[in-house]
Image (tube, coloured by chain):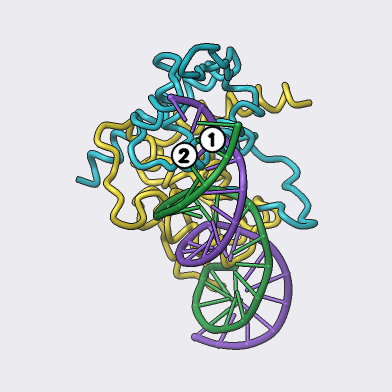
Chain colours: A yellow, B cyan, C purple, D green
Amino acid sequence: MLKQRKNNVEPPPEECPINECLSVIGGAWTPNIIWYLSAQPRRFSELRNDIHGISPKVLTDRLKKLESDGVVHREVMSTSPPSVEYSLTELGKELKPAIDAIVDVGKRLKDIKE
Amino acid sequence: MLKQRKNNVEPPPEECPINECLSVIGGAWTPNIIWYLSAQPRRFSELRNDIHGISPKVLTDRLKKLESDGVVHREVMSTSPPSVEYSLTELGKELKPAIDAIVDVGKRLKDIKE
DNA sequence: CTGTATCCTTGGCGATACTG
DNA sequence: CAGTATCGCCAAGGATACAG
């Protein structure tokens, strides 16, 4: 998403800072990842099972992006077999209200469509 | 956004209904359009000026999509020169809390980045 | 003023196979 | 278990010109 402002297009001067947030939570699958992590820390394969249909490539892509955005923390557990635990950072937890609000209207939109 | 479930991929069985909402507000520019319309009804060219950098094609695309989603109302004013007024429907106004929540964290993310 | 019509580019995502 | 490596598709957007 957000291909706008690609070239030398001047950014809008005074707009709502909504895109900063959507660039974080906007990708396909991304909301689901945050959703599951908000409940509890989870390992890679747990997320893979939780989020039915996501490919490992996309999952790592999203997790790396979220980590670089500072909303997800990645911790390697030195066990055998190795496992990696993902969790939301404090910053990531601040996304919760927005996610909840979106879920809220999402439910209503879904009800209306059916 | 949301290219997932393109082919014969089975949709996730039990997920948060967030995508129903993001498919409405998720496109580039879309949040801004809703943002400006939530303040007051606006005409095509007003939106074009408000949202600096959007092309007329994309603006009409988004408005048509939003209209078909039932969140935006389009009314042709029989004046000379002709003008068209866009406004949020009741359903569209229900998106406001979600937008506000997103704006809220958007501000914080922006502050942190700077 | 309010859009349409074209053409083109891009990057997000899917699928699959492979690795430490 | 937790990823990486490739390859390729294709719809969302950008640029620009034109139309009612």
> Pointer 2 indicates a residue of which chain?
B
Position of residue A27 measured from the top left corner of the image (x, y, whole percent): 52, 49
Report how many numbered discs are placed on residues in the image: 2
- Quadrant of the frame with the C terminus of chain B: top left
Q: Residue at x 45, y 21 (%)?
A: B43
Q: Are marks 2 and 1 in contact (CB under 8 Å)?
A: yes
Q: Amino acid at mark 1?
A: Thr
Q: Residue at x 65, y 58 (%)?
A: A54
For disc 1, the marked residue is: B60
Residue B16 in the image: above or below residue B72: below
Helix or strand or loop: what does disc 2 sit on? helix
For disc 2, the marked residue is: B56
Position of residue B22 measured from the top left corner of the image (x, y, whole percent): 56, 37
Helix or strand or loop: what does disc 1 sit on? helix
> Pointer 1 indicates a residue of which chain?
B
Residue B11 in the image: above or below residue A44: above
